[in-house]
Amino acid sequence: MNGTTDGFQYGLVTPAAAYLMACLGSLLGLRCVVRTLHGDPGWRPGWLVLGATSLGCGIWTMHFIAMTGFTLQQAPITYDVPLTILSLAVAIVVVAAGVFIVGYRGAAPATLAVAGGITGLGVATMHYLGMYAMRLNGDIRYDPVIVGLSVIIAVIAATAALWAAVSVRGLLRSLGAAMVMGVAVCGMHYTGMAAVSVHLHTTGTSAAGGESGTSLLLPMLLGPVIFLVLAGVIVMFDPVLILGEGEWNRPAPPSASASAESAPLGADTMTHDLFRPYEGPWSPGR
């Protein structure tokens, strides 16, 4: 017997919340990668890790917020805890691989193709691993054509995200890019869900072990959401965002530099030292 699935149990609440989390993760990831172009190269790995983790958590959180609205009318759905946690790790690791490739190699077409392919396939793996973690009284089947389409969307979305991470400048442009990426990531998820059909077993109505969606997914979402909030605080207080990239890159006037050298150490001198642009091999224009 075929089961009747519903991906919108709570109406537009879960899709809207999932989209917002995808946009937040994308925006934080973009801003962190932008920061690597303006700061000390020694801090580059840290910013790339923060950006990759933000993107990975945003994508994973989007996926499982959307999954809280997925139900099967004829039987309950539970989730395998280790596989669900593994899907989060996969999301972070594969996004980190793509972010580090473009963070160190740039946005050349060949580099983007490799990094976008790795990241997109990883995001698709995260999605279907999360689906594999579902436990129900039946067999989950997939339409291979729609699955292939969802993977293509994931690769395109990942490639666009990595390109935007190293190419888009300015907070408003980053916000626009994050909104487009949120649409692409959510589109991949709901395309993948459209490929699902469930064939119920004729005996029994209970799921085969695991935790229910509300008892597992909602508490598990707290960790990534808290991380994204903390990452947002770090990015918000970053001087590149406070001053603007143009002001951050503007060299200090010679007279100001001379005054700073002769003046005693005080608030003005400390502010100049804190916010003066980095002048090194990775500074813009070199």
Image: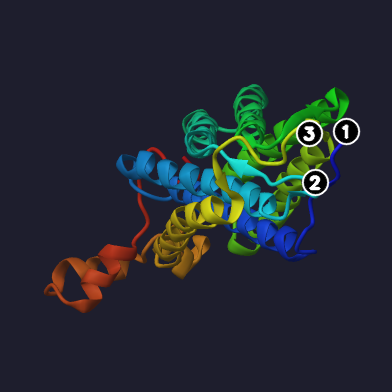
Q: Which residue is mark 3?
A: 150
Tag 2: residue type? Gln
Q: List x then y, in percent, for residue 14.
A: 71, 60
Q: Which residue is mark 2?
A: 74
In the drawing, what numbered circle is on residue 1? 1
Secondary element at tag 3: helix
Secondary element at tag 2: loop
The quadrant the N terminus occupies is: top right
Q: Label 3 vs label 1: CA separation?
A: 26 Å
Between residues 172 and 236, which one lies in front from this camera angle?
236
Q: List x then y, in percent, for residue 187.
A: 78, 45
Q: Label 3 vs label 2: CA separation?
A: 27 Å
- For marks 1 and 2 on the same chain, the one whose residue lies earlier in the sequence: 1
Between residues 274 and 232, which one lies in front from this camera angle?
232
Q: Is the C-beta separation of discs 1 and 2 under 8 Å?
A: yes
Between residues 185 and 247, which one lies in front from this camera angle?
185
Q: Is residue 225 visible?
A: yes
Q: List x then y, in percent, for residue 220.
A: 48, 52
Tag 1: residue type? Met
Q: Label 1 vs label 2: CA separation?
A: 10 Å
- Of discs 3 and 1, which sits in the foreground? 1
Q: List x then y, in percent, for residue 45.
A: 37, 38
Residue drawn where x is 11% and y is 74% of the image: 264
